[in-house]
Image (cartoon, grey):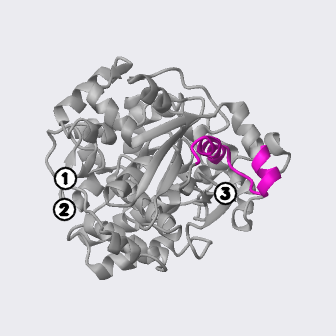
């Protein structure tokens, strides 16, 4: 299995090389050169298997010879042993033909744990084998950072630096990043919004002297291994509702496009998916793009669903790469145009996007109304990101089961939940003690040179 860059000029890599590289040296994102396809019989054979067994079967074709079967099974087992639900990703029925996929039973109570716990184990196995050390730098709108810190904290061959927008994450999200005591993790509160954090992250990767000098590695959803891990729960949930013998649809709350792109990969692998619905909040660039055919950045407006407060959806580049017939030159041109604020999608590519994805948006008022209504009618308390998706999913219900993906445990966003329904969602006992721990955080400017200097000074030699 080889991996190629969406911008066409970086060398093709193996799975392990692409995982450790993160962003391609031409600025693109790595994707598989071809997508393995599962037969209906193969998909039907997943029924009744554990989440870990399904994960092995779904992901195995993508990793090539990076790990033996025994090594990979052990990696998967370690990745999910800390989850607090035997099913790992259980389904809860919200209404007729509408199901919620609970993805918040991992260590940090967010869907990012499914990918980050796995990538932490993959990195550890690879680095130990090669006797190497890396510096991980990540940007987060809230949940990626805490999941990365939880996955890599205390490891002897990894330094972790996480950029998050100062004042734009919830208190719980911030404390998950700032209370760990491990010397190898560094929480950096950066001036600006998430797009600024993500831009500085890409700048660091594109400074090859710095990148090579500190052994830079990335665990944002620009890393293909992150996307691959998320493909698994599309299969596990669909099979539990009757796939491949009947179709299913998915609604996905998304800002950076990684989670719904995983659903696109599942569909290309043979999962019978009727609709992939993009759910956006008031920062609705993805919804606007499908409606107008123009990807045009606007001001990022802080919302009660901060993990979706994004204007540059990095993984959308991966989708465009396929819609443009895998023409790396065309994608490089679009990304160059985006530096000026926008680009227009060709008619052919736009038609393919609209055939593949549908979309919707939820205002702040609609999000709050959904939290309130779902608590009243089902007893289910939703985090605001999940509420955005539930609102949009209801507009796309049909004769096939709709699976709405959750984002996080509602206790990570208590202010929004209390304002909507009057109930304080309690943190699970294992996280309640976090409230009293001292925080370790460094305020940093939106300045590339200052960030590089800090990484050089703080990382272990």
Determine which of the numbered discs, if any, sits on residue 96 in the image.
Answer: 3
> Which of pointers 3 and 1 lies earlier in the amino acid sequence?
1
Q: Which quadrant holds residue 443?
A: top right
Residue 89 seen in the current view? yes
Looking at the image, is mark 3 or mark 2 nearer the viewer? 3
Q: Residues within 10 Å of mark 3 (few under 14, many from 20)?
A: few
Give the alpha-carbon distance from disc 2 to disc 1, as whole Å.
7 Å
Question: Residue 152: horizontal and vertical position, in percent?
Answer: 46, 61
Which residue is label 2 attached to? 1
- 265 shown above or below 86: above
Looking at the image, is mark 3 or mark 1 nearer the viewer? 3
Please report contact status of discs 2 and 1: CB closer than 8 Å, yes or no.
Answer: yes
Main secondary structure found in the magenta portion: helix
Q: Quadrant of the C terminus?
A: bottom left
Question: Residue 148: horizontal and vertical position, in percent?
Answer: 48, 55
Task: Give the residue at x 66% y 45%.
Answer: 387
Q: Which quadrant holds residue 7?
A: top left
- 234 shown above or below 356: below
* Nearer the observer, 216 or 269: 269
Horizontal relation, residue 251 to residue 63: left or right:
right
Give the alpha-carbon distance from disc 3 to disc 1, as whole Å.
39 Å
| Residue at the extreme right of the image, as rendered | 422
User: What range of the chain is rendered magenta?
Assistant: 372-397
- 251 shown above or below 437: above
Give the alpha-carbon distance from disc 3 to disc 2, as whole Å.
41 Å
Circle 3 SS class: loop
Which residue is label 1 attached to? 33
Task: Give the residue at x 25% y 54%.
Answer: 18
Task: Give the residue at x 62% y 44%.
Answer: 385
> Which of pointers 3 and 2 lies earlier in the amino acid sequence?
2
Question: Residue 303: horizontal and vertical position, in percent?
Answer: 65, 32
Please report contact status of discs 3 and 1: CB closer than 8 Å, yes or no.
Answer: no
């Amino acid at each position: 299995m080889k991996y190629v860059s969406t911008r066409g000029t970086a060398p093709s890599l193996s799975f392990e090389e692409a995982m450790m590289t993160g962003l391609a040296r031409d600025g693109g994102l790595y994707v598989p050169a071809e997508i393995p396809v599962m037969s209906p019989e193969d998909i039907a054979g997943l029924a009744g298997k554990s989440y870990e067994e399904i994960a092995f079967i779904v992901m195995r074709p993508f990793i090539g010879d990076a790990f033996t079967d025994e090594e990979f099974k052990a990696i998967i087992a370690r990745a999910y042993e800390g989850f607090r639900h035997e099913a790992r990703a259980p389904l809860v029925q919200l209404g007729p033909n509408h199901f919620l996929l609970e993805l918040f039973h991992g260590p940090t109570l967010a869907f990012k744990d499914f990918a980050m716990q796995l990538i932490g184990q993959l990195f550890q196995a690879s680095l130990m084998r090669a006797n190497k050390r890396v510096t991980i730098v990540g940007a987060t709108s809230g949940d990626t950072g805490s999941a990365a810190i939880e996955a890599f904290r205390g490891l002897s061959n990894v330094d972790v630096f996480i950029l998050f927008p100062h004042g734009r994450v919830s208190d719980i999200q911030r404390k998950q990043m700032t209370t760990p005591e491990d010397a190898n993790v560094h929480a950096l509160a950066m001036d600006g919004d998430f797009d600024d954090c993500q831009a500085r992250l890409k700048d660091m990767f594109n400074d090859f002297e710095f990148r090579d000098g500190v052994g830079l590695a990335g665990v944002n959803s620009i890393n293909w291994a992150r996307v691959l891990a998320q493909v698994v729960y599309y299969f596990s949930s669909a099979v539990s509702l009757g796939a491949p013998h009947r179709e299913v649809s998915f609604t996905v709350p998304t800002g950076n496009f990684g989670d719904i792109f995983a659903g696109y990969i599942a569909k290309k692998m043979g999962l019978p998916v009727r609709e992939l619905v993009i759910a956006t909040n008031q920062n609705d660039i993805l919804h606007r793009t499908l409606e107008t055919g123009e990807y045009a950045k606007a001001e990022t407006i802080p919302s009660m669903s901060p993990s979706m407060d994004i204007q540059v959806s990095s993984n959308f580049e991966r989708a465009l790469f396929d819609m443009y017939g895998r023409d790396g030159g065309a994608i490089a041109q679009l990304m160059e145009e985006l530096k000026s604020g926008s680009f227009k999608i060709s008619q052919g590519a736009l038609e393919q996007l609209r055939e593949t994805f549908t979309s919707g948006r939820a205002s702040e008022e609609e999000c709050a109304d959904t939290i309130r209504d779902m608590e009243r009618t089902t007893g289910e308390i939703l985090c605001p990101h999940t509420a955005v998706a539930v609102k949009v999913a209801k507009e796309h219900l049909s004769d096939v089961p709709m699976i709405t993906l959750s984002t996080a445990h509602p206790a990570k966003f208590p202010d929004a939940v209390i304002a909507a329904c009057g109930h304080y969602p309690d943190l699970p006992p294992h996280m309640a003690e976090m409230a009293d721990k001292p925080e370790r955080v460094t305020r940093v400017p939106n300045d590339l040179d200052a960030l590089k200097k800090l990484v050089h000074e703080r990382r272990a030699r």
